[in-house]
Amino acid sequence: MNSGGLNYRVVIFFLAIVFGLGFSAPTFLQTDKGAKISLGLDLQGGLYMLLGVKTDEAIKSKIKSIASSIKYFTDDNDILIDSLKIKEERVTLTLVDPDEEKNLDEMLKKVTGLSIEKDKLNYKLSLNSLEKEATKEYAINQAVETIRNRLDQFGLTEPNVARQGNDNIIVELPGIKTGEEEQRARELIAKTAHLQLMSVDEVRNDRAQTMSEREASAYGDLILPDGRNPAIKHIVREVPILDGSMLTDAKVGFDQMNQAVINFSLNSEGAKIFGDFTGKSVGKHLAIVLDNKVYSAPVIRERIGGGSGQISGGFGVKEASDVAIALRSGALLAPVKLLEKRSVGPSLGADSIKASTMALALGFLIVVIFMVVYYGIAGIIANVALVANLFIVLAVMALFGATLTLPGMAGIVLTVGMAVDANVIINERIRELFRKGSSIKKAVEQGYGNAMSAILDANITTLIAATVLYAYGTGPIKGFAVTMSIGILASMLTAILGTHGIYEFLMPRIEKSKNLALWFGIKGKGK
Amino acid sequence: MQIFSKDKTYDFMAKSVPLIILSLILIISSYILLGTKGLNYGIDFSGGTIIQIKYDKKAPIQEMREKISVDKIFENASITEFGTPEEVIVRFSSSTDSVQEDLSSKITALLQGTGNFEVRRVDIVGPKVGGELREKGLMAMVISIFAILLYITFRFEWRFAIASVIALVHDISIALGAIVLFKVDVNLDILAALLTLLGYSLNDTIIVFDRIREEVKGSKSFDLFYIINYSVSMTLSRTILTSLTTFFVILTLFLFGGEILHGFGLTLLVGIIVGTYSSIFVASPMLKWLKFDVKDYKSKEALKESRRIEKEKMRAQYEQGIV
């Protein structure tokens, strides 16, 4: 056996301490470089949201755009169709001219994922189940992408947007400081930014205030509220001319009255459709519809080529800029709904940090003092291991880019209580052997051996519980499981291996002094 | 320093029958509490909304109630003090699913004129999420108990596993009783506390069981109660010490960790006390009641040992090329 001095255990322990100090330093010193532990939203304040995606809406809007392209195609080719209508997730139409059946069928065949039911010249179109799934899937991914883009442009620090599970999205915004900022961010996220250019039903529009939605639907119309004054209604054709998917850019500008407006431009396909439509509809009204509200319905004076347009509607500058961001980053194919939201003000976070640090420090102090009083130098050795353990936990967390949450803090506090347990078990075993008359060297060696199975079994069961907690927990609770698991694993290194190494290192001195009261807190003289 | 004198064997098992009756009474009253009053689910599990508001003076709860009840959303809201008299929680069971709806400015507007205050936290949990979280929480409990049962069966023997799980159920039941009794809001942190308790209670039991296993193998006695008494006595100072240090650490968490960690701390404080008690007075005698047979275990272990030696011998012979 090694007779004192350097040994592999103490070397490993030393390396572990260096690792712990080295990698936790960036966190403590808040240096620019190096991996740091980031604070959870509950500690630094911020906004957490779990959003659900209304995927059914994506299917409806896909159906709508299919209807638009049918309308454009038939208008363009002078195919006469009648009662083109959208009903929930289905388009119905009747072909008037039987000679065109082949033409229309060919066009419809090109639309992917369309299931076509035909009863003579009556068409019923819907999406097949495969296409529905694909549309939903696409809508969710697109929503994640779009929300991320919007928040990036909004200029918040480190927004986190991620898909969770089947159709949910997690949004985390740590940088939010004021309620006003939070509100703007939430409005930006929720804005579907669905731009549609629609034609006003010139025949029936004067009945807009009185017509029922049902009657409107029978005519293939929609009743939409005005963007500025929701009490004012407009009647528009339910099949839009084109929608925001053909938008390439949107910018804030100012009109002659110095009012903020949003200038948008369309891609070439959109520009062509827009040009054709305006050319055919001079003298009629064009409704510019954003998120199902009519922002303006100007009279078309001439054919508008070039594919650019303007949304005016008495916007404030901030609002106009947010709308422009939303339009630029694309429409949400499906609107989102709120499933869960947690917002913590920065002052509350600061209070939580203060309180839990205080508890950590105090609990730590109690344990440390207690160990020294009860075990003498053996207690000091255990305390060295405990401190090393804390640094290693922080270092590992920093390396993994883990987030420290309030329950995570609680986990660390608990680890302090449990990490000394291993040393308590070992020290008690060593004392027992002294009572039986073992020599110092033998007592230490055997004490570690005897204690091992108990410590391992106890730690492994706790790890099992922590793993399950991690697998089934959400957010902050995961943080708790993480810190506790790292703490337990680190304690095996520090409390078992590390302290053992220290004893070996000091063995010649312990054997020389033979003072058990000093070294192990137990009366008697060692051998 | 030493608390317990060296080699004294205390007769713990002599008191096991009256104590197990005490345990039964505690468990039954806990379940009566659970059945009658029931768990007070917080919004994490039941869904709903809470708004935490801090005033710079004592919060005028009555006035707040009158002012906010004007709005339909807050009609059935409860307002309770949260930690200090300055801080309150407004809670109601409905939850908006609109991303834009701004409850914070809504309530700020309603509370205008009640003094200087700050909205510090708005948590909304939809009903679906609440249900999911509850389900997951229960799953976590059940799965970890089974995993641990398996592990202990593998490392010890099935009776040890059953006995430790009974002790575990004992601890968690009483902790749940305390949660009901002290009207703790059951949120995710309480689930974490219960799972920690699960790990902790097992820790304690396993340390004692480990010693019992050692003594069963090593001692000459066949009297299980004697072996238990001896093992518990030998591990007693460790049990008490660790429980004390952990207890103090959690006490600081409970006292100074802030209101948010209050329920968490309370659950663990109760848990540590019953967990320590149960490892000595519930789990250990349970071995006897489950008819754990020292002789049988010894012979099994001896058989295992002889097989191991035989195997080694054979391997040695094989390696030397004898077979």
Image (spheres, coloured by chain):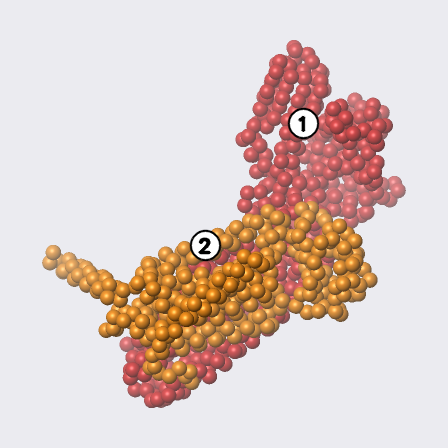
Chain colours: A red, B orange
**Residue at 76% in and 55% down:** B69
Front residue of A199/B268: it is B268
State the CA–CA distance, disc 1 to disc 2. 47 Å
10 Å crowding of disc 1: few (<14), some (14-19), many (20+): some
Which quadrant of the figure has residue A505? bottom left
The amino acid on which the numbered mark 1 sits, given as a three-letter code, is Lys
Work out which quarter of the rendered image holds the N terminus of chain A and state it.
bottom left
Rendering coords of residue A415 (x, y %): 49, 68
Please give the chain letter of the residue carrying mark 1. A
Check disc 2 and report the residue beneath it. B142
The amino acid on which the numbered mark 2 sits, given as a three-letter code, is Val
Is residue A121 at all visible to an observer of this figure? Answer: yes
Which quadrant of the figure has residue B114? bottom right
Check disc 1 and report the residue beneath it. A87
Above or below, A381 against B128 in this view is: below
Front residue of B314/A284: it is B314
Res A232 label? none
Determine whether, in the image, residue A124 is placed left or right of residue A364. Answer: right
Kindly indicate whether the residues beneath marks 1 and 2 are on one polypeptide chain: no
Above or below, A349 against A335 in this view is: below
